[in-house]
Image (cartoon, rainbow, N blue to C red):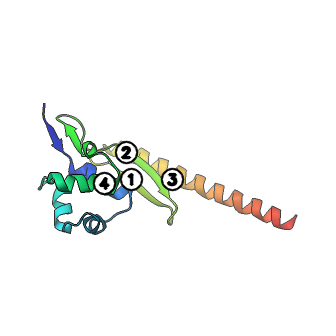
């Protein structure tokens, strides 16, 4: 049973923090090309780079590794971020189309719920103003 570095996990964590490859490269003092190659699996990071990646992304270095047979993705994470209600979806590589459809439906429901909650807060604020 072997253990391997998973560039997909690095990409997911980087995207979770809203960082571009350039942002991360500048943060850990490597080239954008290095980040790209590490994420695509064409380059294994040195121990020094691995430590800087983990430190910059506030995770354990072990979180970037997987055993043989273990999925390379971290999992599916859905979160609505307030910056324009941008959806961040991570770890969906290789999921079947029916699962992706279910995730899209869940997103629509979440977006609708956010709009309803914002409308209710707005209405509450108007009631307080008129009282």
Cα–Cα span, label 4 and label 1: 23 Å
Q: Which residue is mark 1?
A: 89
Give the class, few, some or many, for how many residues have Cα within 10 Å of label 3's Cα (few <14, many ≥20): few
The residue under the point 47% across, 48% down is 105
Q: Earlier in the sequence, mark 2 or mark 1?
A: 2
Q: Earlier in the sequence, mark 3 or mark 4?
A: 4
Q: Which residue is mark 3?
A: 108
Numbered disc 2: secondary structure: loop
Q: Position of residue 101 (x, y in %)?
A: 40, 47
Is mark 4 in CB contact (under 8 Å) with mark 1? no
The residue under the point 29% across, 65% down is 27
> Foreground: 36 or 102?
36
Q: Position of residue 119 (x, y in %)?
A: 68, 60
Q: Which residue is mark 2?
A: 76
Disc assigned to residue 55: 4
Side (left or right) of 114 relative to 122: left
> Foreground: 100 or 24?
24
Give the class, few, some or many, for how many residues have Cα within 10 Å of label 1's Cα (few <14, many ≥20): some
Q: With respect to residue 23, does 10 lie above or below?
A: above
Cα–Cα span, label 2 and label 3: 16 Å
Cα–Cα span, label 3 and label 4: 35 Å
- Pick out the residue farthest to the top: 1
Q: Earlier in the sequence, mark 2 or mark 3?
A: 2
Cα–Cα span, label 2 and label 1: 7 Å
Q: Earlier in the sequence, mark 3 or mark 1?
A: 1
Is mark 2 in CB contact (under 8 Å) with mark 1? yes
**Residue 73 found in image quarter:** top left
Cα–Cα span, label 3 and label 1: 13 Å
Cα–Cα span, label 4 and label 2: 23 Å
Side (left or right) of 126 relative to 30: right
The residue under the point 49% across, 55% down is 80
**Residue 38 found in image quarter:** bottom left
């Amino acid at each position: 049973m072997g253990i391997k570095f998973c560039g997909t996990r690095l990409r997911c964590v980087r995207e979770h923090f809203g960082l571009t490859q350039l942002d991360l490269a500048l943060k850990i003092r490597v080239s954008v090309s290095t980040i790209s190659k590490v994420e695509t699996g064409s380059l294994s990071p040195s121990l020094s780079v691995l430590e800087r990646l983990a430190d910059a992304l506030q995770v354990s270095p072990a979180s970037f590794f997987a055993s043989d047979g273990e999925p390379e993705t971290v999992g599916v994470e859905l979160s609505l971020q307030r910056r324009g209600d941008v959806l961040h979806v991570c770890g969906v590589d290789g999921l079947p189309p029916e699962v992706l459809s279910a995730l899209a439906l869940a997103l629509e429901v979440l977006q609708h719920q956010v709009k309803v909650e914002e409308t209710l807060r707005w209405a509450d604020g108007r009631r307080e103003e008129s009282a």
